[in-house]
Image (spheres, rainbow, N blue to C red):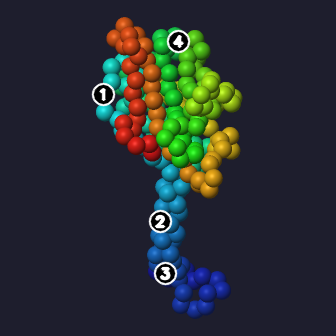
Amino acid sequence: MAERRLAGKGPGVSRSRVLRAGAPFAAALITVTLMAVVAGAHHTDLRDPNDTRGRLDVMQVRFRHQPGPPLWTVITFGEWGAPKMWDRGYILVLLDTDGGTGAEYYLLVRSLGRAFGGSLWRAHATGPDSYLGAVPVKRFSRRSASVQVGLTRLKFGGSRSFYRWWVQTLYTSRACPRTCQDRAPNGQPV
């Protein structure tokens, strides 16, 4: 069987020979592309133990910080819906942008009766906190809620080029008459 010669490649250069020679380069290109896609996802997942009573005991926080605005997905051990969370349950994502001991901003997820709403707040040491506007909230299951905010809506202190975050849930019920609270992580902020 005669090998098919490639036009313009001169005598003796076959298609299979070109493919064999180019295979390592193609494999390297595919590897580099896949590594860039995986590295570009920038997910940070945080696990939290089953350590608080109530429906809003945090099990996991999934954090996506690229591409686009940061997105936090809070997953709890218990299930919950908007009617049962009305005036009983809240999820907060606290953001330290200034390097102090507390948060300068927080995202609040709360029940609106039949659905969930999100808002961005500026925390103040004295006096009431300032409402800065709405933020999107999505639910992917009866145990989770996702909230997102663009960093351009936040002010960073001095030459600070990063921020720290943590999640806190608040839930009041018969099982939690004095408000069950959970914080993730339990120690230092992420």
What's the CA distance linking mark 1 and mark 2?
A: 42 Å
Is 144 or 153 nearer to us in this picture? 153
Residue sitting at the far front: 126
Residue type at mark 2 is Thr
Label 3 vs label 4, nearer the camera? 4
Residue ID for mark 1: 51
Place of residue 136 in the rendered image (x, y in percent of width and height, measured from the top left) = 63, 30
Q: Amino acid at mark 1?
A: Asp
In space, the residues marked 4 and 1 are separated at their CA atoms by 23 Å
Q: Residues within 10 Å of mark 1 (few under 14, many from 20)?
A: few
**For numbered disc 4, what is the local secondary structure?**
loop
Q: Mark 3 or mark 4, which has the lower sequence index? A: 3
Q: Which residue is mark 4?
A: 86
Q: Which quarter of the rendering shows the C terminus?
A: top left
How far is the residue under mark 3 from the one under mark 4?
65 Å
- In x, y percent, where is residue 163? 54, 47
